[in-house]
Amino acid sequence: MFRKLLSFDEAKQTIAKQFPAEPLGVEETPLLQSDGRILAEDVIADMDIPPFDRSTVDGYAVRAENTFGAEENKPARLIVSGTVSIGKLPRTTVKNGEAAEIVTGAPIPEGADAVVMMEYTTRKTETVTVFSAAGKGENIMKAGADIKKGEKILSQGQLLRSREIGVLAAIGKANTKVNTIPCVAVLSTGPELTEPGKKLYPGKIYDINAYTLTAAIMESGGKPNYLGLCPDNIERLHAALTHALDSSDMVVTSGAVSVGPKDVMPKTLDTLGKPGVILSGIAIKPGKPVTVASISGKPVFSLPGHPASALLTFQLFIHPLIQNMSGRKPQKSAAVKAYASMRMFPAKGRRTFVMVKLKRESPERFVAEPVPTAQSGAITMLAKADGFLEIPEDLQFIDAGELVIVKLF
């Protein structure tokens, strides 16, 4: 039988107290493999970007004063002293009355303080005619204009994507420190289960939970470790859980947590290490049988076998913990306001989560309609639902037309 059922809030508090909300660890990874990882440290630039004054256009590097007053009918004529190429230090100096041909991205040569665009010039042998005056600093990106040496360019906890990786590459980082990705073992129990792809014999069903939970772990920022199916046998289950704990940072199982003779998960968990089971049963619907253990500091979540119930309770309890362990910033679920399409009742004494589909009655009005089936074993509940709403355990009902908050999947 279940131990004393904890309320939804008590269960959340128990889990939070047992498992610290902090990253699992830090590792260094090559920059090309860091997409999607969480930065584990502040990044301070150790150089200016760009590291030198550079031209932003093709044209001629000049002394701005030599172009003052230049216009279509009164151009300035300058002697071309040389050419500046990209990727090389200038070998020419721009003196009074001179100009140097330059391409976009090339360093500004000594003596020059502006660049005239090619479109405003004509070239004849060693002379260039300038038809438009250039102001001091025009068409020049100064050293450090993008990133200054000593500037914090990325912060600990940031998600690394293409833009952030580009910033790290700009300052020459080949490797970066990131938070360790928590490895989460996935184990399904039940003699009725068959792995997808294999022949389905009478009385058997395909294993849904291993696949939905594996995907949910990846969506949460974890690395799944699928360990296959295990029968409801204490010896086999003990061996499978021991292997899961040895090879992973967290274990998620489904099935064998109710009160039937084959529901041996809580008893087995208590034999694996201290403190063992920290909660067995939560006053929620669906998800009452959820069992949580701590084995030598590693969390083990044993979820109900019903697919919709397993996935919902994963989102409620496991998703936030994986995010904490991976160092991801907690994100609130997107939510919308809607009006209940009908009267909805909670299970007596339990926090009730009702799967709903949203219908738009007008541009400003959504209606939340419970999905047709109330069977937690139906995976189509989640496929059909847009989100869910909570009915507190102390509320008698939500009335038709009442304003509710729907948390979106």
Image (spheres, rainbow, N blue to C red):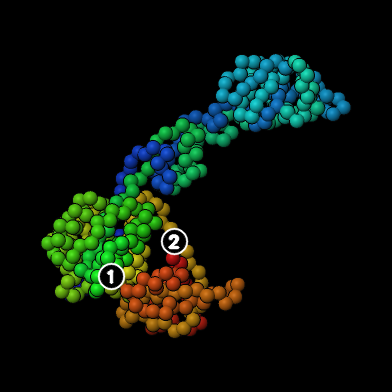
* Amino acid at the residue labelled 1: Ile
Rendered location of residue 59, percent (x, y):
70, 27
The residues tagged by marks 1 and 2 sit, at their Cα atoms, a distance apart of 35 Å
As displayed, is residue 31 above or below residue 218? Answer: above
Answer with mark 1 or mark 2, whichever residue precedes in sequence: 1
| Category of crowding for the residue at label 1, using alpha-carbon neighbours closer than 10 angstroms: few (below 14), some (14–19), many (at least 20) | some
Residue 140 seen in the figure: no
Rendered location of residue 169, percent (x, y):
47, 35
Marks 2 and 1: in contact by CB < 8 Å? no
Look at the image and tell me in which quarter the C terminus lies: bottom left
Q: Which residue is mark 1?
A: 205
* Mark 2 residue element: loop
* Residue displayed at 47% across by 37% down: 168
* Residue displayed at 32% across by 66% down: 208
Nearer mark to the viewer, of 1 and 2:
1
Q: Looking at the image, which is closer to me, 304 or 277?
A: 304
Q: Which residue is mark 2?
A: 332
Look at the image and tell me in which quarter the N terminus lies: bottom left
Q: Quadrant of residue 156?
A: top left
Rendered location of residue 302, percent (x, y):
25, 64
Left or right? Give the position of 243 relative to 398: left
* Residue displayed at 34% across by 55% down: 322
